[in-house]
Image (spheres, rainbow, N blue to C red):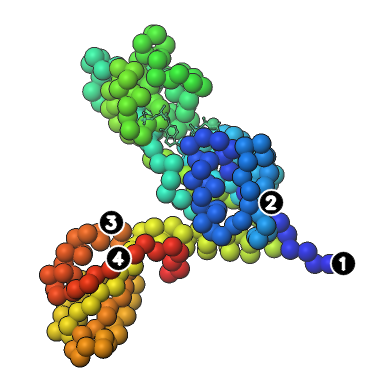
Amino acid sequence: MIDQEPRLKIAIQKSGRLADESVNLLKNCGLSFDVSNQKLLSPVRNFPIDILYLRDDDIPRMVERGVSDLGIVGNNVFDEQGDVIDPLLPLGFGRCKLTVGVPTQSEYQSLEDLRNKTIATSYVNLTGTFFTSIGVPVLLEKLDGSVEIAPSIGAADAISDLTSTGSTMTLNDLRPIADIFDVQSFLIANRRIDEFGKQKIIDRLVMRIKAVLTAKDYKYVAMNAPQSAIEQIRNIMPGLKSPTVTPLAEAGWFSIQSVLPENRYWELLEELQKAGAEGIIVLPIEKMVL
Ligand code: PRT
Ligand code: ZN
């Protein structure tokens, strides 16, 4: 019998807020596949995986049942549904918050003020668990859409809904009083994946995803500096190990290369300049394996 390499399936959102970023992430991992609006499944040409396009709400259940081995979906969906899956890796996109909002003119200021009040939400489990954890009993009214209008039509005293900029709440005359759950997309996996050698393929994909995500957090930096500045520059650079230092043609001068964290590189550049670095070049990093 021929020992064939298994093929995995990964479910991503067909269209919506997570669709483009999910496709981009997989493409940045070097996966080659065609995307079309009509397609429900794309085979990847250069990696043993097929991409399934689904509604985001269906992804955790399909992964739980093993119809798909992997999925990309928000933790708001799988935590709300209570699906039994392994969240392997946070992916850093699709970020938002589950926020409690009250009518702007209402007297409610804090979560405690909502004791025994009615809260409309599509996220009854997340919201209920949260209010239980803080010891404030509330009544929950499940709505699948148009949650924001619930207070104005008299269906609820407050709402609990996803927000990113907060403008939808403001537009509907609501005032946020507390963020109760942080949302982002995760790579999720079926719990019983270790059959048929699939785990090895998942490990390869996870390594690639981590390399793509890590690269986003850093910049590559190269600069020239006189020997007298090198010690100080080394102390400024929070690089991976020590920076690479190579002599330049001009005596007493060196080229220094390292990486800087994305969230601090402007301030570190100023410090490097003060320490005597010249000709500083900063480049984005495409992939980075720690
Ligand atoms: O068709 P399908 O079922 O696949 O998609 P969907 O319509 O259910 O979901 P979609 O595409 O709207 O969102 C998919 C996922 O994106 C969500 O499950 C979250 O994990 C994540 N996400 C990130 C968001 C938001 N940000 C977000 N802002 N999901 C919804 N919103 C809503 C929010 O509720 C509000 O109504 O966007 C509106 C605008 O928000 P503000 O605060 O910027 O005004
Ligand atoms: Zn959905």
The x and y percentages for residue 125 are 48, 30
Amino acid carrying label 1: it is Met
- State if disc 3 and disc 4 touch (CB < 8 Å): no
Left or right of residue 152: residue 105:
left
Measure the C-alpha gap from mark 1 to mark 2.
24 Å
Amino acid carrying label 4: it is Val
Which residue lies at the image location 80% right of the left edge and 67% below the top edge? 3
Position of residue 173 relative to residue 42, above or below, is above
Which residue lies at the image location 39% right of the left edge and 64% below the top edge? 285
Position of residue 266 relative to residue 98, above or below, is below
Disc 2: which residue: 43
Measure the C-alpha gap from mark 2 to mark 4.
37 Å
Q: Secondary structure at mark 2?
A: strand
Disc 1: which residue: 1
Measure the C-alpha gap from mark 4 to mark 1.
53 Å
Measure the C-alpha gap from mark 1 to mark 3.
53 Å
Q: Earlier in the sequence, mark 4 or mark 3?
A: 3
Amino acid carrying label 3: it is Asn
Q: Secondary structure at mark 1?
A: loop
Q: Quadrant of residue 177?
A: top left
Which residue lies at the image location 40% right of the left edge and 31% below the top edge? 162
Q: Can you tell which mark lies on residue 263? A: 3
Q: Secondary structure at mark 3?
A: helix
Q: Is residue 12 visible?
A: yes
The mark lying in front, picked from 1 and 2, is 2
Quarter of the rendering occupied by the N terminus: bottom right
The x and y percentages for residue 142 are 49, 20
The x and y percentages for residue 138 are 39, 21
Disc 4: which residue: 282
